[in-house]
C-alpha cells in the first residue's frame, strides 16, 4: 500500500479565484486572508479594467502569496496568423504576470478539432519555445498543465503527465515545467512514475486539487470539493511530496453548483475539506 501524506496545515493552502468565481479579486483577497488561506492563483479575467500592479500590491498587503496566473496557452491553430495571435496573447499574459508579481503562468495548451494531435503537440512545443526570451526578460516561468483526454478535441493535445514531461524534456529550459491537476490525472496508471519523473526533471511547478464527483453532471463545471468524489488525494499528494515538492496545494474547483451558493459558506467548506481530505 502506498503511504498517505500527513495532514496539511493552511500554510500551503492556495485557492484559485475561479473557485470563488462570483467574487471580485479584491473581495477574494480579503475573504481568503480572513479564512487563513495563504496563497492565491489569479485568473486573468479578474484583472480586466484594473491596475495590475496595484492589484498585486493589494494581494500581498493581505498577506497572500501570488502563486500563479491562469492562464496562457492555446497555441495550435490552422493558420500562421492564428498561431501568431496566440503568441501575442501569451506575451500579454507574461507581461501581466510580471506586473502582478506572479512567478508562474499555467498553460492550457490547446488543440484544434480535425488537426492531428501530433501536429498540435508540435505547435505547442514551438509556441512555448518562442516565448522563452519573453519569460527570461520578465522572470516568469511556464507550467504545462496536461488535461484529461476528454478535452483532447479542442482544449489540450497534452493529455497525460508523461506527454507533459516529454515536452519539458524536449524544450529543455528551467523556465518550463508542469502543473499537475488531480482532476485530469488521477486515472492514469503511470501517474506515480511520471510524478517521480517530474521530480528528477525539477519540473513540478504546481499541484492542483479538487475531486471527481460520481455521477459527474458536467465534465467542465461539476468538479467536487475534496472528499466529494473518488480521487485518492492524500496518496497523490504523498507521491508529489516524495519528489521534494514544497509548494502550495492549490484548490481549483469549477462548479456551477458551488458558484450558485453563498461564497462565504463555500469558502468555509473549502478550508474544511482541505483539512479533512488533502
Image (cartoon, rainbow, N blue to C red):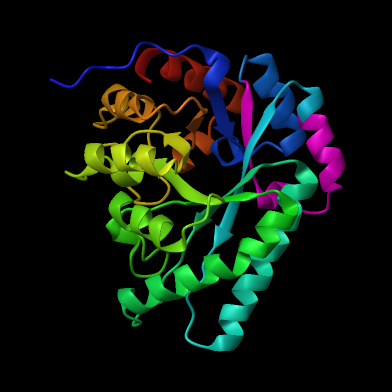
186 vs 193, nearest the viewer? 193
Position of 245 compared to 79: left or right? left
**13, above or below 84, in the image:** above
9 vs 125, nearest the viewer? 125
Q: Read off the magenta span.
A: 38-59
Visible in this render: residue 187?
no
Image quarter where the C terminus lies is: top left
For residue 84, which quarter of the picture?
Answer: bottom right
Figure label count? 0
Query: Residue 46 colored magenta?
Result: yes
Q: Position of residue 116 (x, y in %)?
A: 31, 79
**95, above or below 33, in the image:** below
**62, above or below 41, in the image:** above
Q: Residue at x 29, y 59 (%)?
A: 150
> Most extreme residue toward the left, as rendered?
1
Q: Position of residue 121 (x, y in %)?
A: 38, 70
Q: Residue at x 46, y 69 (%)?
A: 124
Q: Position of residue 91 (x, y in %)?
A: 69, 64
Visible in this render: residue 181?
yes
Q: Residue at x 40, y 41 (%)?
A: 181
Q: Residue at x 46, y 14 (%)?
A: 272
Amino acid at each position: 500500500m502506498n503511504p498517505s501524506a500527513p495532514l496539511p496545515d493552511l500554510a500551503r493552502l492556495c485557492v484559485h479565484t475561479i473557485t470563488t468565481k462570483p467574487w471580485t479579486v479584491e473581495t477574494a483577497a480579503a475573504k481568503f486572508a480572513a479564512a487563513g488561506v495563504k496563497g492565491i492563483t489569479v485568473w486573468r479575467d479578474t484583472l480586466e479594467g484594473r491596475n495590475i500592479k496595484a492589484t498585486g500590491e493589494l494581494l500581498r498587503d493581505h498577506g497572500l502569496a501570488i502563486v500563479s496566473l491562469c492562464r496562457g496557452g492555446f497555441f495550435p491553430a490552422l493558420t500562421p496568423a492564428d498561431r501568431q495571435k496566440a503568441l501575442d496573447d501569451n506575451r500579454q499574459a507574461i507581461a501581466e504576470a510580471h506586473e502582478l508579481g506572479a512567478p508562474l503562468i499555467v498553460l492550457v495548451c490547446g488543440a484544434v478539432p480535425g488537426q492531428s494531435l501530433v501536429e498540435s503537440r508540435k505547435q505547442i512545443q514551438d509556441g512555448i519555445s518562442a516565448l522563452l526570451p519573453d519569460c527570461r526578460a520578465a522572470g516568469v516561468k511556464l507550467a504545462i498543465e496536461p488535461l484529461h483526454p476528454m478535452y483532447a478535441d479542442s482544449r489540450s493535445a497534452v493529455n497525460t503527465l508523461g506527454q507533459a514531461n516529454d515536452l519539458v524534456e524536449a524544450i529543455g529550459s528551467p523556465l518550463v515545467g508542469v502543473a499537475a491537476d488531480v482532476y485530469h490525472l488521477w486515472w492514469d496508471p503511470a501517474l506515480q512514475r511520471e510524478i517521480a519523473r517530474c521530480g528528477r526533471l525539477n519540473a513540478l511547478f504546481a499541484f492542483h486539487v479538487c475531486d471527481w464527483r460520481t455521477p459527474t453532471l458536467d465534465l467542465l463545471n461539476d468538479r467536487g470539493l475534496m472528499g466529494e468524489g473518488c480521487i485518492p488525494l492524500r496518496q497523490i499528494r504523498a507521491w508529489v511530496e516524495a519528489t521534494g515538492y514544497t509548494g502550495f496545494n492549490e484548490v481549483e474547483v469549477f462548479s456551477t453548483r458551488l458558484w450558485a451558493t453563498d461564497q462565504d459558506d463555500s469558502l468555509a467548506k473549502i478550508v474544511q475539506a482541505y483539512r479533512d481530505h488533502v
